[in-house]
Image (cartoon, grey):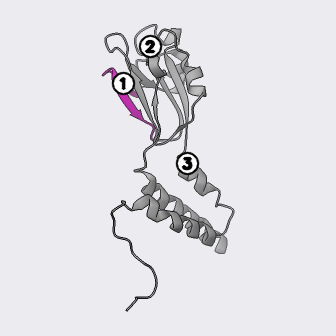
Amino acid sequence: MAWINSKLFFTSLMILVALIGVGVGGTVHKVGDSSGWTMMGVDYQAWASSRTFQVGDSLVFEYNNEFHDVTEVTPHDFELCYSSNPLARYQTGSDTVTLTKPGFQHFICGVPGHCDIGQKLGILVFPPRWVQWLLQFRDQSDHQALLCLLHLLPLATSPTNAPQYQMGPSPL
């Protein structure tokens, strides 16, 4: 019974932290750095391999929208450079894609031939840092995890000018 309560508590704690952490922003990655999203002179896989992508981060694609677009595709369509069944398509020339879930994400230029010569980006998106931090407590007692979490909650949830409350007996 204690084991079930422990697992239930930990799951509830994860959900609570997830709800609190949704508003925390991440790193902004300009795809291709100063070259941007182009079919010439950028190895996007090498570019991606020097970075870590996490939920909450953003990818900024800057490109000439007369000649390119950004098409999010499935892994299968990524390998085949197939853009006819996109998960999403961006065409403004300055698009920001927020990474909202862990796992692989794949982007290609949907203009015929561009993906085939390397205008494609596949990345692995990791869970947010706070989830990785929280998972270290799964083998410790619920009491220790709760104390550590409660110590950090005011930092994560309170605006800087919010009233502070003291816990304990009334001073009256």
- The image quadrant of residue 146 is bottom right
Magenta segment: 87-100
Label 1 sits on residue: 89
Q: Which mark is residue 130?
A: none
The residue at the far bottom in this view is 172
For the point 54% across and 25% down, which residue is it?
122
> Is residue 90 rendered magenta in the image?
yes
- Circle 2 Cα neighbour tier, 10 Å, few/some/many (<14 / 14–19 / ≥20): many
Real-space Cα distance between discs 2 and 3?
A: 31 Å
Q: Earlier in the sequence, mark 3 or mark 1?
A: 1
Label for residue 129? 3
Mark sitting earlier along the chain (2/3)? 2
- The amino acid at mark 2 is Thr
Say what amino acid the circle numbered 3 marks: Arg
Q: Nearer the viewer, residue 56 or 70?
A: 56
Q: In the picture shown, does residue 89 fall above or below 1?
A: above
Query: Of helix, strand and loop, which one carries label 2?
Result: loop
- Using the rendered image of the protein, determine whether residue 108 is visible from the camera's viewpoint: no
Is the residue under label 3 in contact with that under label 2 (CB below 8 Å)? no
Q: Residue at x 62, y 55 (%)?
A: 135
Q: Position of residue 36 (x, y in %)?
A: 43, 19
Q: Is residue 140 left or right of residue 71?
A: right
The residue that disc 2 covers is 38
Q: Residue at x 54, y 19 (%)?
A: 44
Report the Cα–Cα distance between label 2 and label 1: 16 Å
Q: Secondary structure at mark 3?
A: helix
82 or 18, which is in the foreground?
18
Q: CA distance from mark 3 to mark 1?
A: 28 Å
Front residue of this view, candidates 91 and 58: 58
Residue contact between numbered discs 2 and 1, judged by CB atoms under 8 Å: no
Residue 4 at what x, y percent from top left? Answer: 62, 69
